[in-house]
């Protein structure tokens, strides 16, 4: 076989399969990742908001979009 166009790396593929997301807690500053099933989400007409309980302080943390 010959790859004509390189796809995602194994690590990236794993993240995609598990739908892993990064979260940031605004209460304590903890940044962590969670797989599908560990986080919750709310959908409205335009946006989907992902959130998860912080493993450090148990406050609600929101998806980390990076800065
Ligand atoms: Zn926290």
Image (cartoon, rainbow, N blue to C red):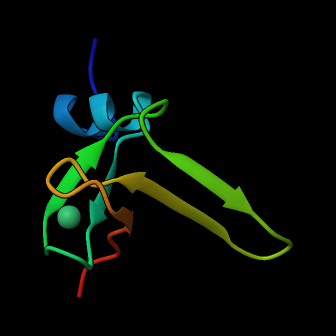
Image position of 67 with respect to 12: above or below: below
- Name which residue lies at 33% across and 62% down: 59
Task: Judge left or right: residue 65 versus residue 37.
Answer: left
Q: Nearer the viewer, residue 28 or 48?
A: 28
Q: Residue visible at 19% across and 58% down?
A: 57
Q: Quadrant of the C terminus?
A: bottom left
Front in this rendered view, residue 63 or 13: 63
Classify residue 9 by image quadrant: top left
Horizontally, residue 34 falls left or right of residue 41, namely left
The N terminus: image quadrant = top left
Residue at the spot x=23%, y=77% of the render?
A: 27
Q: Quadrant of residue 66?
A: bottom left
- 26 lies above or below 11: below
- Is 1 positioned to the left or the right of 43 in the image? left
Q: Residue at x 20, y 28 (%)?
A: 10
Estimate the x, y position of residue 39 in percent, counting from the top left: 46, 43
| Residue 30 screen position, x and y as percent | 13, 65
Measuring from the top left, give residue 53's x and y in whole percent. Answer: 36, 51
Tell me residue 58's x, y (percent): 28, 54
Q: Nearer the viewer, residue 40 or 66?
A: 40
Can you tell me which quadrant of the image ligand 1 is in?
Answer: bottom left
């Amino acid at each position: 076989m010959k790859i004509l166009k390189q796809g995602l790396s194994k690590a990236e593929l794993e993240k995609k399969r598990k739908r892993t997301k990064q979260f940031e807690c605004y209460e304590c500053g903890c940044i962590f990742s969670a797989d599908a099933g560990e986080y919750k989400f709310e959908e409205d007409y335009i946006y989907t908001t992902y959130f998860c309980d912080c493993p450090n302080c148990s406050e609600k943390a929101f998806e980390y979009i990076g800065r």
